[in-house]
Image: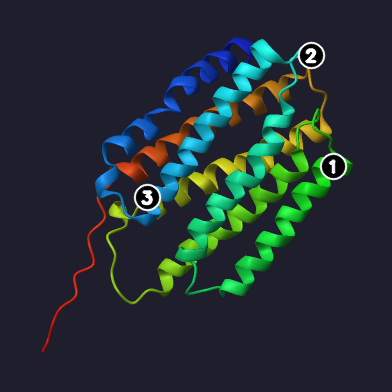
Amino acid sequence: MSEIFNESTRVLIVQIYSWYVFVPVVLGALFWRRLNNAQKFILYIAILSAVNHKISQVVRTYLATDSNNAWVAHAYVPFIFWFTWRLYKNELKVLFSSTFFNITLIICLCFFGVNSLFIQNLKILPTNGIFLISGVFIFWGVSYFYSLLKQTVYKSLEKEPVFWFTTGVIMYYSSTFLIFLLVYNYLDKDSETTYIASIFNAFFNLVLVTTYIISIWVKPPRLVLNNFS
């Protein structure tokens, strides 16, 4: 195994992430009063990610006799999907109807339940659910960028929180979709390629949290209504 892509590298990145994941949470608490609705949902997603990571660590280290914390991911997947769904339902209303989003929500939540109960039990990582939300999130992200092209009013994208959030979502879930899940499904778990995949996945976790931070940090311009009367 190479000197860079090994278990120690993965552990180092995970240790960095364990602290870094709380940065957007702290930032959101400090800037709460000036956050708009989109930024608040991004903060909720950041909080959920931080709580999920910490609970997974605690369960794996102290509570699970077999070091199995897969059930935490089973609970995390529908929650992260719902919060992201709420965010994009508002941002993509110019492209998709409310009915489309409601049907998508029902179908995905039913799939998560069936998968956890009958296909991948609570001791197995819910890769089917992760695979599904990765595909849906990538679709919403691409749709968001397409919606920007259809706008007739110029926007300063560097101050748009959802722009930064979507950038991170596409980068992270594309890596999850193409690197993490596919590699783990078709290669031996102890191969060097799986270590490389897990390291890249951990790295893109850091990238995703960074986009959370930027999304909460930026100060989007307030809508000013001109009175012509």
Q: How far is mark 1 from mark 3, CA to CA?
A: 34 Å
Amino acid type for the residue under numbered disc 2: Asp
- Asked if marks 1 and 3 touch (Cβ < 8 Å), the reply is no
Query: Front-most of 144 and 4?
Result: 144
Q: How far is mark 2 from mark 3, CA to CA?
A: 38 Å
Image spot of residue 156 (x, y percent): 27, 60
Q: Write down the residue under mark 2.
A: 66
Instruction: Please indicate whether residue 142 sits to the left or right of residue 103 in the image.
Output: left
Near mark 2 (Cα within 10 A), the count class, few <14, some 14-19 or many ≥20, is: few
Instruction: Please indicate whether residue 124 sits to the left or right of residue 26 in the image.
Output: right
Amino acid type for the residue under numbered disc 1: Leu
Question: Residue at point 73% right, 30% down?
Answer: 71
Secondary element at image label 3: helix
Instruction: Please indicate whether residue 211 sits to the left or right of residue 15 in the image.
Output: left
Mark closer to the observer (1, 3)? 1
**Placement of the N terminus among the 4 image quadrants:** top right
Question: Residue at point 68% right, 30% down?
Answer: 72
Q: Write down the residue under mark 1.
A: 117
Query: Front-most of 56 and 211?
Result: 56
